[in-house]
Image: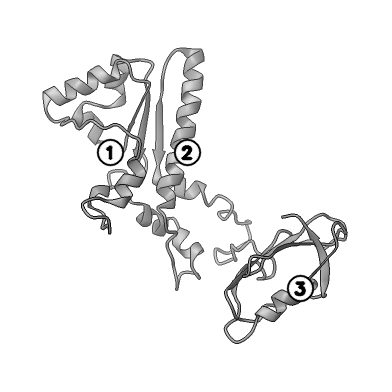
Amino acid sequence: MLRQFPSSLAGESRFFLGTNRGKRALALDLKQPEGLAVLHRMVETADVLVENFRPSVPARLGIDYPRLKAINPRLVYCGLTGYGDSGPLSEKGGFDQVLQCLSGMAVFQGGGSDNPQLVLGSVLDYFTSALLAYGVAAALFKRERSGVGQYLSLSLLRSAQTIQAGRFVWAESEGREVPRDSGAGGLTGIHLTKTEALYISVHSNHDAPGDGQGTEVSHPRGHRCGLSRRNRSGPCSLAPWRNCYGRRGKTVSLGRYATDEFTAKAV
């Protein structure tokens, strides 16, 4: 599929080259006895096999876990699907951007249900791959002690839920419309200025003197400053950031950070 992605590189796909760099490939037609026999011979000495077919396909092709386990009991077999091994959606193909929409990521990333936005870069594909690698490492570690492999099941749907675990928490009395934003008082976020953009991150909702919590501010001209009530390395004026707001920007109330000087610390 990646070979067919639009690309400005003549005769090649940038996506395919980027994701498959450094790999060695062998094309097999598993619907032919000769191709299946080659795979079975490779499995005899393999440590790990990863497939991303729909759940019913591996058995139909003769490459399901029970069959390959009989060839090599030490094999770690990874089945990666869109929606899991069972359930009403299990036989549907998974696609990163579809799962972002289905799982609510697009709504959280954008400005709510009226303005959903995708996280670019196939974030679910890459996150699921990282979880798969972690699971394989754990399975190989266990195999060194038990002498046998195991079956690992991963899905894009579970990855989409896992990556949003911090947002999927409601108190019993809360409605589903409760804000999911972790920012303090609307200050955390990217704000347009007269020149570029300003990112402010408030790390705590508390304002107790000496609590060690701080705020990180990234100035559009590259000046970064940590704001804290602990006197560590001298004053840091908020005036440069205030002066950036104007015609193109929007007014952001700094609330308890509205004094002219705070303490700068490493961030």
Q: Is residue 18 left or right of residue 57?
A: right
Q: Quadrant of residue 216?
A: bottom right
Q: Is residue 190 left or right of residue 31?
A: right
Q: Position of residue 138 (x, y in %)?
A: 50, 26
Q: Are marks 2 and 3 in contact (CB under 8 Å)?
A: no
Which residue is label 1 attached to? Answer: 53
Which residue is label 2 attached to? Answer: 131
Q: Residue at x 57, y 83 (%)?
A: 248
Tag 2 secondary structure:
helix
Which residue is label 3 attached to? Answer: 238
Image quarter (top left, top right, bottom left or bottom right) of the C terminus: bottom right
Foreground of the two, 89 or 114:
114
Mark 3–mark 1 Cα distance, whole angstroms, equals 55 Å
Residue projecting furthest to the bottom: 247
Is residue 174 positioned above or below 14 on the image?
below
Judge the density around disc 1: few (<14), some (14-19), many (≥20) Cα neighbours within 10 Å. some
Q: Residue at x 82, y 54 (%)?
A: 212
Is residue 233 positioned above or below 58 on the image?
below
Q: Disc 1 residue type? A: Phe
Q: Is residue 16 visible?
A: yes
Q: Position of residue 135 (x, y in %)?
A: 47, 31
Q: Disc 3 residue type? A: Leu
Q: Residue at x 27, y 55 (%)?
A: 9
Q: Which of the marked residues, 1 or 2, is nearer the chain's N terminus?
A: 1
Q: Is residue 158 visible?
A: no
Q: Which mark is residue 212?
A: none
Tag 3 secondary structure:
loop
